[in-house]
Structures are given as structure tokens and as C-alpha cells.
Amino acid sequence: MTGSESETETEGPRDFLTDLAAIGPFFSVHAHLPGERPQFPWVTIGELTSHAEAMRRRIAAVQRAMAVRAGSRAEQIEARVAASAAHFGVVARLVSPGLAALVSGYQLSMEPSQLWWQDVLGGPFPLSVPAPAHRLDGTDRSAEEACRKLVSELIGPVTSVVAKLVPVSAWVLWGNVASAVNSASMQIAEARPAATDAVQHLAEFVFRAPQLRTEQSQPGPGFRRSSCCLIYRLAAEWANGTCGDCVLGEPPS
């Protein structure tokens, strides 16, 4: 391989990660070599999907943060509300760069054991992906298969562990996934108007997953999820009791 060819091989992925970061903080990722084990405080996403205690700690931390914001004690915040919020945050952080990468022609690893994160609160947590990312072959089929893996190998396991830990409805949790997918696709389309059709197609494909087929509206500006993330349970403490796409909110005009 010549020097110029090597530069071409590496420059694309590097530019691709920079482009992801330009969309917004939920899309920005760090990179590590495949098989590398970053040092603590980096831990694998697999800790969340295979060890219930890791997710339990995350939910408890979110519950405490909610209590501080509400000026109450942690035990006054319903566990299912904290679980839904924790789940929503993790799912949105994983879905956002995953979808944006596909629009750019790359596939990020969907293996929980290869994705590393730092368990911190206060915005999108640090996330590191194996690099270079896999380049897609340019067909809809390859991007759709990557979407299928995103749901089945990454989002599904995260959702399942939350459902096992806290008595929160799977309907609520998969509604969180639908909302996260729609929000990510809308942000990508806004940042990259030329990619609007591509990201809309991928979002619609994700919505065909068995767990999301109960959603009554398709992704897009008028999306309204079929469930509520439960933040309304904190309406007395929060400035607004419902989100913009909540089934309990006012219908879009």
C-alpha cells in the first residue's frame, strides 16, 4: 500500500467522526482501536446489558439527580420514572451516532462489549467506538441490516435489563426508543438537509422492528409516541409535565 493510499484509508473515518460531532453532543464519540481496553473510568456498554447491578446504579444515580432538582428525597422519586429517564438517556446516546454513521456510509460496532462509556450524569455521557468504522457497501440492504443489529444487539438488551429491574412497562420503554430514533433522525436531517430522505428511510425501517410496530405514527416532524416517558409524574417539580412528542400532550397543529 502506498503512502497516499494509506492516507485515503484513514482520512475518511477521521473526517466521518468529526462530521458526527458537528451534528450535536449526542452524536460526538471518542475512538479506540478494536480490541483495545481503555482505562477506568471507561467501562463497556456490556456492563449495562449483562450485569444488572451496573444498570441499577445508573437508575439510582438518575433518581438522586431528579430528587436534587425537585428539592426532595430520592425515595420520593418513583423508581419507574427514574428507570425510564435513565433508559431514555442511554438509548438516545447510542441511537444518535449509530443512525448518523449509517447516513454517512459507515457502521459503528453494535457489540456492547466493544463500545465503551463513562457512567456520568449531566448531559450525553462519553462514548467510545472501535475505529476505523466499517464502511457500508452503499446499498439500502446493508444499512437496513445495520439498523436491525442496532435494535437487536444493542438497544434490545439495554431495554430488557431495565424492564427486569424495575416494574416499568415495556410499552413505555420501547416508546422511549421510538422517540429517541425520531429525535435523532430529525437532528440529522436538520444538520444535513441532503440526507433527509436517507435518514427518514432508516428511521422508518427501525420502526418496523417487532417492538416498535405498535407505534401509531411514523417518524418525522409530526411524530407522536404512543406512550409517555412518565416525566409527567414529576409535573409539580418540572416546568413542563410532558415532552413535545408525548401522547399526553397537545396534538401538533
Image (tube, rainbow, N blue to C red):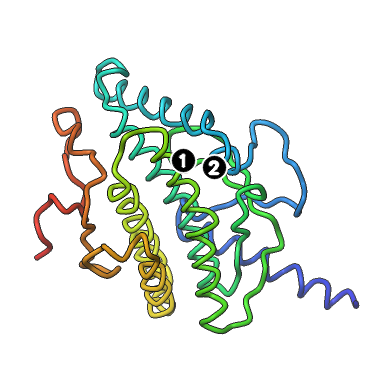
Mark 1: which amino acid? Val
Which residue is under mark 1? 161
- Answer above or below: position of 239 versus 131: above
Give the secondary structure at mark 1: helix
Locate residue 238, reporting x and y percent: 20, 33
Quadrant (top left, top right, bottom left, bottom right) of the C terminus: bottom left
Quadrant (top left, top right, bottom left, bottom right) of the N terminus: bottom right
User: What is the number of the mark on residue 21?
Assistant: none
Instruction: Identify the residue shown where x is 28% and y is 15%.
Output: 73
Q: Quadrant of residue 197?
A: bottom left
Asked whether, in this view, residue 49 is left or right of residue 122, the answer is: right
Locate residue 213, reporting x and y percent: 31, 66
Label count reads 2
Instruction: Identify the residue shown where x is 48% and y is 27%.
Output: 57
Which residue is under mark 2? 49
Circles 1 and 2: CB distance less than 8 Å? yes
Cα separation between marks 1 and 2? 6 Å
Instruction: Identify the residue shown where x is 53% and y is 31%.
Output: 54
Give the secondary structure at mark 2: helix
- Answer above or below: position of 163 versus 65: below
Asked whether, in this view, residue 72 is left or right of residue 121, the answer is: left
Upstream in sequence: badge 1 or badge 2: 2
